[in-house]
Amino acid sequence: MLALRMPDENKPPGRTRAWLAGFAAVMGARAVGLALLPVLLVEAPALLLVLSPMLAHLVLTGPVLGAWMYFAAALTGSILQGAIAYHFGLALGDKARIWLEGRGAATHAATTRILVWMERAAPLVLIAFAGPPVCALAGVARVRAIVFYPVMIVAQILWVGACFLFGAAVTEQIEIIHAFVEQHVVELSAVAIVWVGGGWLWKRHRRRKAAQLS
């Protein structure tokens, strides 16, 4: 039987820093996509999917993009981000889990629970939760690449496809949302930027306060 986990090995510091920078870029891209959601939804929906292939963004962009463009952009973004997240977790090990918790990407209870599930049924966990934090935890759990990549790609195809079908089923409602966003794109963009930027500043403040108390 194929082992799901690979043995521990030391990573060169340069490679570790590179994957940390890569994962920070992934999370930054998703934050940019969220902050610029209104303008990207109206002007560049394909770019929105490459930057931030979140479930809501997938549903909202499906009806306005052709199927080929939708799947190309969504799968490129989601698979690339999943791969970077996996190698981030693989390179940093438990430090990656601490980084996720410290940046507010996941709670300690959530990472602990998911790592336990990874030990028992990593493929099922990846199918159910295919986002970057869980892909990073797959690396922390040292799930083998030969297991991770096929399951992660299948998971992304399933989720991207399901969101496309759901978006097609509620096209009329999404068209109403698009019309509203297009009419108020400036105001909504300002609100989104303040919301995302304010959330980042608040998390940063909490991290500094926690560091002072420790």
Image (cartoon, rainbow, N blue to C red):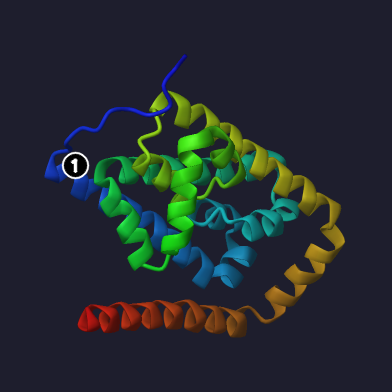
Q: Is residue 159 above or below residue 34?
A: above
Q: Amino acid at mark 1?
A: Arg
Q: Is residue 141 above or below residue 209?
A: above
Q: Is residue 83 left or right of residue 177?
A: left
- How far from the left and from the top, in percent, is residue 153? 54, 33
- Along the line of sight, which residue is nearer the eye, 5 or 35? 5
Q: Is residue 121 above or below residue 195?
A: above
Q: Is residue 143 left or right of residue 182?
A: left
Mark 1 is surrounded, within 10 Å at the Cα level, by few (under 14), some (14 to 19) or many (20 or more) other residues, namely some
Where, quadrant-wise, is the C terminus in this rendering? bottom left
Q: Which residue is pictured at 38% across the width and 29% down the height?
A: 5
- How far from the left and from the top, in percent, is residue 202? 39, 83
Element marked by disc 1 = helix
Q: Which residue is pictured at 46% across the width and 45% down the height?
A: 116
How many numbered marks does the figure carry?
1
Q: Which residue is pictured at 63% across the width and 78% down the height?
A: 185
Q: Quadrant of residue 70?
A: top right
Q: Quadrant of residue 75?
A: top right
Residue 81 shows in the view? no
Q: Is residue 65 left or right of residue 106?
A: right
Q: Which residue is mark 1?
A: 15
- How far from the left and from the top, in percent, is residue 160? 65, 44
- How far from the left and from the top, in percent, is residue 3? 41, 21
Q: Furthest-top residue in view?
A: 1
Residue 189 shows in the view? yes
Q: Quadrant of residue 208?
A: bottom left
